[in-house]
Amino acid sequence: MNDRFTQELFHKFHRLYRGHDHPRSLLRHGFACGDGWFLLVRDLSEAIEVACDHAREPVPEASQVKEKFGGLRFYVGVASDRVHDLLERAERDSLKICEECGREGVLCVTQTRCYKTVCAEHATTFGMRPSQEFRHTIRYPKRSL
């Protein structure tokens, strides 16, 4: 994600990203995903902070945000089931949003079996085709506060 989007997220959601500048933080170099997911990450960040405020629970600390197997991965420390539900929904939604531009996308694959969620235009640009055999399943152990 570009530096302008990264700094906006760090500034606006400073409680969630409070450790981003720690020398060992995986967020010290920013978000390891494309600009097309900026709105998704922004909306998720806001939803997490609002949900925690409403429930009067601490905002978890985000430790890493990246693309993996074509989908968003958003890792936090100890968080409520409510937060984990928000994470799961955003990660499912990422499989329908082009990571490059934010338009509607599908999970695609290269001949070397690299996965990425992209729109038709970016699939052509990257020489990708829609994935038929890969079924994306995200499961989290529930951790309560």
Image (spheres, helix red, strand yellow):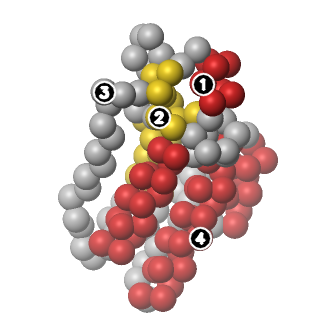
Task: Evaluate whether residue 83 shows in this view.
Answer: yes
Q: Is residue 16 left or right of residue 101?
A: left
Q: Earlier in the sequence, mark 4 or mark 2?
A: 4
Q: Which residue is mark 2?
A: 107
State the CA–CA distance, disc 1 to disc 2.
9 Å
| Badge number at residue 133 | 3
- Label 2 crowding class (10 Å Cα cut-off): few <14, some 14-19, many 20+? many
- Name the secondary structure under disc 4: helix
Q: Which residue is mark 1?
A: 123
- Name the secondary structure under disc 2: strand
Hey, what amino acid is under mark 3?
Glu
Q: Quadrant of the N terminus?
A: top right
Give the number of the mark in front: 4 or 1: 1
Q: Earlier in the sequence, mark 4 or mark 1?
A: 4
Q: x and y percent of residue 112 in the render? A: 42, 11
Q: Is residue 126 left or right of residue 61?
A: right
Q: Which residue is mark 4?
A: 46
State the CA–CA distance, disc 1 to disc 3.
17 Å
